[in-house]
Image: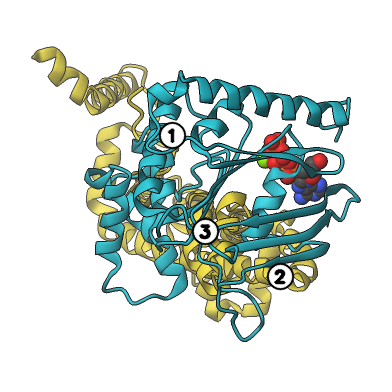
């Protein structure tokens, strides 16, 4: 009985217990060893920073969230659309593929200044959006392209046998075959969108950006390390939410049939 | 369809078929075959003799390089293609893993733009034929290998085809399941009397099932002999141990030996 309860809940009891132990040790060691708070603030100080700066930090989180989510959605739409175009038309693929690769291999920090100059500091959010999109877009494109062409050969024959139209082949064969690949791309890309947004904010520096990354730099400059920690925690909390949201999406769409998500019982 | 009377026109007529693949392999040369309504024909031969190629051409997957495949009793559409009423069962179940058994069996309707109204009944009917009516909502991965094959057969039957083409459908299954599906298939065929063209490697399977066995040899693929199996249906375990069965198996084996002797390499050198 207890064993069953334990094995059911140990998944969250263990990490939570470890976390509490760690925080207690942290709180104790900071006072015991007299570590200055601009090097390592006690958890209680960070909690207070949350309390006092919470509302303004939440505003910054909202800014970063918007950039990340919009860039991510744009990456999904454009990546899939382009992936579909690539499979429909080899000429388009041959023409555009090298440029997609160039976008992918150029480090985003390196192009950030250029994009920001082009878009203008008065529309910084748009520049950030574009930068985050550049980072997030490639995994979706490449996974869609691979996925769409990975349909089972026997099923392709079957579709030919019944004289399926191009659209039906796409809708009932290629798209479902590509789904696990696309969702894999979506997961990678959601994380990259956040990284892209944060890196772009760093690159943009001051100005009109009010996102979390900028708040971290600002807190660092003012040696307000508790607030820095608070902002950092918010950022990783958001990252975790994003990660689990895409995990959930993948599970919801694949758990009935795909090897990656089905629960194996033998 | 009444037995005994010899129908005048074949359902499918292969005339002087030759197939050369783009890499230069001559898979088939000079293949003539009439497939009569209600027959259960087995194509038997060593690996690489063009059985699958022939079956696929009958199904319209891949054009013959020479010769013609006629459907004397079928309607031809505006572009001159015969309206083949066929069902095809591949060696693998070839099911869509993302779709339920129901949706898999209903696929021919989905692809052919048929009115949706009759689909549930027809799918239920096909699933009943193969004994899987309780599994309509399952996904393929929840089924055993033999059950998947049955779903594949149900899908081939759901449009009520005139000809059922089967390419080593049971080769990947264990013997017990294979015997069971052999019997089920014969029962179905005996009730419905479609025409079956069945590709197999197994002498025993071909004799057990067929009204006629066509033996092929390789390099290039061609017909080297045929044998009618006169025994009536239903056939059961008793038939498997009977004298006529043994005789037929021996004669088919001899034909097959001749086929192998015709090209001593025997196996596919590609
Ligand atoms: N797509 C292809 N391109 C080139 N050669 C092919 C192709 N498909 C088949 N062949 C060749 O055609 C010949 C006949 O092949 P086929 O698959 O019809 O043989 P089979 O009798 O079905 O053999 P098995 O019993 O092993 O399935 C073989 O020599 C094979 O190498
Ligand atoms: Mg074959």
Residue B227 visible in this rendered orientation of the protein: yes
Residue identifier under label 2: A114
Which quadrant: the N terminus of chain A? top left
Letter of the chain shown cyan in the rendering: B
The reply, left or right, for residue B186 in relation to residue A92 is: left
Colour scheme of the picture: by chain
Q: Position of residue A238 (x, y in %)?
A: 36, 50
CB at disc 3 and ligand 1 closer than 8 Å: no
Rendered view: B11 above or below B191: below
Residue identifier under label 1: B182
> Would you identify the image quadrant in which residue A70 lies?
bottom left
Which quadrant: the C terminus of chain A? top left
Q: Quadrant of ligand 2?
A: top right
Give the CA distance from mark 1 to mark 3: 20 Å
Q: Position of residue B11 (x, y in %)?
A: 57, 63
Q: Position of residue B129 (x, y in %)?
A: 30, 48
The reply, left or right, for residue B60 in relation to residue A261 is: right
The reply, left or right, for residue A52 in relation to residue B149 is: left
Give the CA distance from mark 2 to mark 1: 71 Å
Q: Which mark is residue B47?
A: none
Q: Which mark is residue B37?
A: 3
* Image point (66%, 64%), residue name: A112
Q: Residues within 10 Å of mark 2 (few under 14, many from 20)?
A: few
Q: Furthest-bottom residue in view?
A: B78
């Amino acid at each position: 009985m207890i064993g069953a309860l334990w094995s059911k809940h140990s998944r969250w009891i263990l990490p939570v217990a470890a976390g509490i132990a760690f925080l207690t040790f942290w709180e104790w060691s900071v006072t015991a060893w007299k570590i200055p708070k601009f090097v390592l603030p006690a958890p209680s100080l960070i909690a207070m920073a949350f309390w006092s700066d919470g509302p303004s930090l939440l505003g910054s989180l909202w800014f970063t969230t918007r950039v990340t989510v919009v860039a991510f959605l744009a990456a999904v739409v454009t990546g899939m659309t382009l992936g579909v175009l690539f499979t429909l038309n080899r000429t388009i693929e041959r023409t555009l593929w090298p440029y997609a690769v160039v976008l992918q291999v150029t480090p985003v920090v390196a192009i950030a200044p250029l994009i920001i100059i082009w878009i203008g500091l008065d529309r910084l959010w748009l520049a950030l959006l574009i930068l985050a999109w550049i980072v997030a877009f490639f995994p979706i494109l490449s996974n869609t392209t691979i996925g769409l062409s990975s349909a089972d050969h026997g099923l392709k024959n079957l579709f030919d046998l019944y004289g399926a139209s191009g659209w039906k082949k796409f809708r009932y064969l290629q798209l479902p075959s590509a789904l696990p690949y696309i969702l894999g791309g979506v997961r990678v890309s959601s994380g990259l969108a956040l990284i892209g947004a944060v890196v772009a904010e760093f690159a943009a520096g001051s100005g009109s950006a009010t996102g979390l990354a900028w708040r971290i730099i600002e807190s660092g400059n003012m040696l307000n390390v508790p607030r820095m920690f608070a902002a950092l925690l918010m950022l990783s909390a958001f990252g975790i939410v994003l990660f689990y949201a895409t995990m959930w999406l993948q599970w919801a769409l694949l758990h009935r049939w795909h090897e990656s998500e089905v629960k194996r019982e033998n | 369809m009444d037995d005994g009377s010899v129908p005048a026109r074949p359902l499918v007529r292969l005339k002087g078929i030759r197939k050369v693949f783009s890499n230069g392999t001559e898979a088939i040369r000079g293949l003539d075959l009439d497939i009569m309504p209600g027959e259960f024909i087995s194509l038997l031969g060593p690996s690489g003799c063009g059985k699958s190629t022939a079956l696929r051409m009958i199904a319209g997957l891949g054009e013959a390089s020479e010769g013609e495949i006629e459907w004397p009793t079928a309607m031809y559409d505006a572009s001159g293609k015969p309206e083949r009423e066929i069902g095809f069962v591949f060696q693998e179940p070839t099911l869509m893993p993302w779709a339920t058994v129901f949706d898999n069996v209903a696929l021919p309707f989905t692809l052919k733009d048929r009115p949706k109204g009759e689909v549930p009944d027809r799918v239920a009917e096909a699933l009943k034929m193969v004994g899987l009516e309780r599994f309509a909502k399952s996904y393929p991965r929840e089924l055993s290998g033999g059950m998947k094959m049955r779903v594949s057969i149900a899908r081939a039957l759901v449009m009520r085809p005139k000809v059922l083409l089967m390419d080593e459908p049971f080769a990947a299954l264990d013997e017990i399941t294979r015997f069971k599906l052999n019997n089920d298939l014969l029962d179905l065929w005996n009730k419905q009397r479609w025409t079956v063209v069945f590709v197999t490697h197994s002498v025993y399977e071909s004799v057990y099932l067929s009204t006629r066995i066509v033996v092929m040899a390789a390099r290039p693929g061609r017909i080297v002999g045929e044998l009618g199996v006169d025994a009536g249906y239903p056939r059961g375990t008793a038939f498997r141990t009977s004298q006529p069965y043994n005789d037929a198996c021996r004669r088919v084996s001899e034909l097959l030996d001749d086929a192998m002797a015709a090209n001593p390499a025997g196996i596919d050198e590609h």
